Every structure is written in structure tokens, then in C-alpha cells.
């Protein structure tokens, strides 16, 4: 099993319809390939966790890196894992409202640079804190 957490920035802002289309494609592919994860979207930036069989995750991440809809991909975590953090989600998703994010995790400032510096466990902790605080608003599939 393998987990990759990465950050990227949309080339141009994505509409709700574009994000919905992206999620439908991702969920179908992920179900077919035993891949799970979560996608957070904040002011044009993505934080995504993908996890599953090593070969599938590495191949998917190569495809993700070639996707022209985003740029500035930074890998936060790229590790072998023993169990999935999101075993039942083909791809959970939440758009993030910046002010709510600050309040949820107790940070005065929170930006891409801070996300880059998160350690693997801290990144997972951040994601879990956010998810637990916003469970009623996240689309889990």
C-alpha cells in the first residue's frame, strides 16, 4: 500500500461544474483501481491524499503530474503505508472557506507555504481535523 499527499494550484479557478466533473472521473477510476483519498480545495489550491496499491498510486500520480489544469505540484508525503486512512472514500471532497479553516485548526495564518512544511503525520492530522470538523459538508463517495 502507498500514500501520496500533494499540493498544487489550479491554472485558472475551477467552477463547481468543472470540479464535479473531475470528481466523477476520479471516483470512477479510483473505484476500479482500489484507490481512496480526499481532495481539499482552497482559493485555487488543492491538497490531495491518494492511497492504495503502490503500483496504482505511483501510476496515478504520474498522470496527475501531467495534468495541465494545475501547476506547482509539491509532494508533502510519498510513503509506503500499512493501512488506508480513508478506506471507504473513492474521493472525499470539500471546498474550503479560508476563515473557517483558520478557526478549525487554530492558525492565525494558513497558506500554501505552511502546507508545504507539514510533516507527514501533521498533514494527516490536519486533514483529519478538518474532516471531523466539517463532516456534514464534505461529499464522501
Image (cartoon, rainbow, N blue to C red):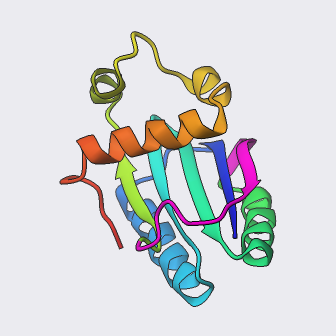
Which residue is drawn at the image coordinates 63% and 85% (left, top)? 33
Q: Nearer the viewer, residue 95 or 115?
A: 115
User: Which of 90/45 is in front?
Assistant: 90
Looking at the rendering, which quadrant does residue 62 occupy? bottom right
The furthest residue to the bottom: 32
Magenta stretch contains residue 87: yes
Would you identify the image quadrant in which residue 29 lies?
Answer: bottom right
Asked if residue 58 is positioned above or below residue 106 in the image, the reply reads: below
Left/right placement of residue 24 relative to residue 82 reads: left
Q: Quadrant of the N terminus?
A: bottom right
Extent of the magenta region: 70-88
Q: Position of residue 21 (x, y in %)?
A: 45, 71
Image check: 44 left or right of 128? right
- Residue at 52%, 43% in the rendered image: 124
Q: Residue 118 in the image: x percent, y percent?
A: 62, 29
Q: Residue at x 58, y 89 (%)?
A: 32
Residue 103 x/y as whole percent: 28, 22
- 104 vs 95, nearest the viewer: 104
- Asked if the magenta segment contains residue 13, the reply would be no
Amino acid at each position: 500500500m502507498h500514500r501520496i499527499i500533494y499540493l498544487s494550484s489550479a491554472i485558472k479557478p475551477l467552477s463547481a461544474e468543472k470540479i464535479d466533473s473531475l470528481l466523477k472521473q476520479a471516483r470512477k477510476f479510483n473505484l476500479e483501481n482500489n484507490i481512496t483519498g480526499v481532495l481539499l480545495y482552497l482559493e485555487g489550491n488543492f491538497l490531495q491524499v491518494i492511497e492504495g496499491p503502490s503500483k496504482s498510486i505511483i501510476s496515478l500520480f504520474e498522470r496527475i503530474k501531467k495534468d495541465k489544469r494545475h501547476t506547482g505540484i509539491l509532494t508533502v508525503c510519498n510513503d509506503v503505508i500499512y493501512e488506508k486512512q480513508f478506506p471507504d472514500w473513492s474521493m472525499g471532497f470539500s471546498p474550503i472557506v479560508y476563515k473557517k479553516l483558520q478557526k478549525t485548526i487554530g492558525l492565525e495564518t494558513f497558506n500554501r507555504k505552511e502546507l508545504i512544511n507539514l510533516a507527514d503525520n501533521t498533514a494527516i492530522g490536519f486533514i483529519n481535523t478538518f474532516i471531523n470538523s466539517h463532516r456534514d459538508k464534505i461529499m464522501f463517495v
